[in-house]
Amino acid sequence: MTQKILMVDVDGVIVHPVHQGGWAAQIEADLGITRADLQANLFVPHWPSIIHGRADLQGVLDDVLHQIAPHLNARVLMDYWFRNDGRLDEALLEDLATLRSQGVALHLATVQEHHRAGYLWNTLGLNARFDAMHYAADLGAAKPDLAFFRAIEARTGRLSQDHFLLDDRQDNVDGALAAGWSAALWDGSRPLAEVFVP
């Protein structure tokens, strides 16, 4: 039997916000911009294009900030965001490293735009812990859409059933199962060894 590739989600699985209320929990005090303004002016109108790789976060964010927070630039806000949404789950990463040492291929399968994907892979050092990273802006599709899973299969060259997704969202797990993958919902309540058996 062919060993499955373990596809691991990022946010809510191996990466968590530094603060309890999310990466923007203290953004008004720290940067002088409200979460509501960011939601209304960045995430609602622009996020679908950014996350699918059709628009660049830094360029869009510079334009948005010029209108709603001219004292900020995109680089400052992105650095703040990525830093405050970058606490690694070292215990889970150690368990994953054990699987990798046993020959299990570990890939990331995540909904990210290009800049944060680069931060996660290079700055946080996930490139030393995983064999590959598959992310929405690079694939042109996002979980739970079937196109996301098919694009990853095209890259791995493996059959649908050779992939196993570990994700913290039920809709993504359902999407993976519908694509013919194996999948499990991750909430940290059970050991990895009970959730994924190579």
Image (spheres, rainbow, N blue to C red):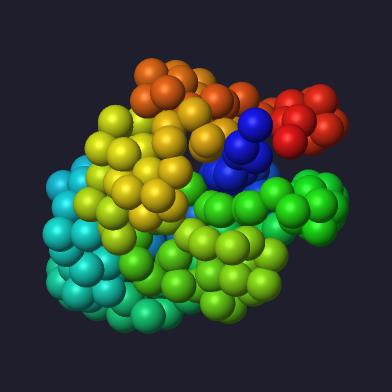
Depth check: 19 or 10 in front? 10
Estimate the x, y position of residue 61 in percent, counting from the top left: 25, 68
Depth check: 174 or 150 in front? 150
Query: In this rendering, does residue 112 appear at all?
Result: yes
Position above or below: 42 against 7: below
Q: Residue at x 23, y 52 (%)?
A: 140
Query: In this rendering, does residue 84 appear at all?
Result: no
Q: Residue at x 72, y 31 (%)?
A: 196
Q: Quadrant of residue 21?
A: top right
Q: Quadrant of the N terminus?
A: top right
Estimate the x, y position of residue 174 in percent, counting from the top left: 44, 19
Position above or below: 87 against 164: below
Farthest residue, direction front: 1
Tell me: 98 left or right of 146: right
Estimate the x, y position of residue 152 in percent, counting from the top left: 38, 47
Q: Quadrant of the C terminus?
A: top right
Estimate the x, y position of residue 3 in percent, counting from the top left: 65, 39
Depth check: 111 or 71 in front? 111
Q: Residue at x 27, y 67 (%)?
A: 57
Q: Quadrant of residue 23?
A: bottom right
Q: Residue at x 40, y 49 (%)?
A: 157
Depth check: 113 or 26 in front? 113
Position above or below: 120 against 91: below
> Across the whole image, how many numbered discs are drawn on residues?
0
Tell me: 19 left or right of 60: right
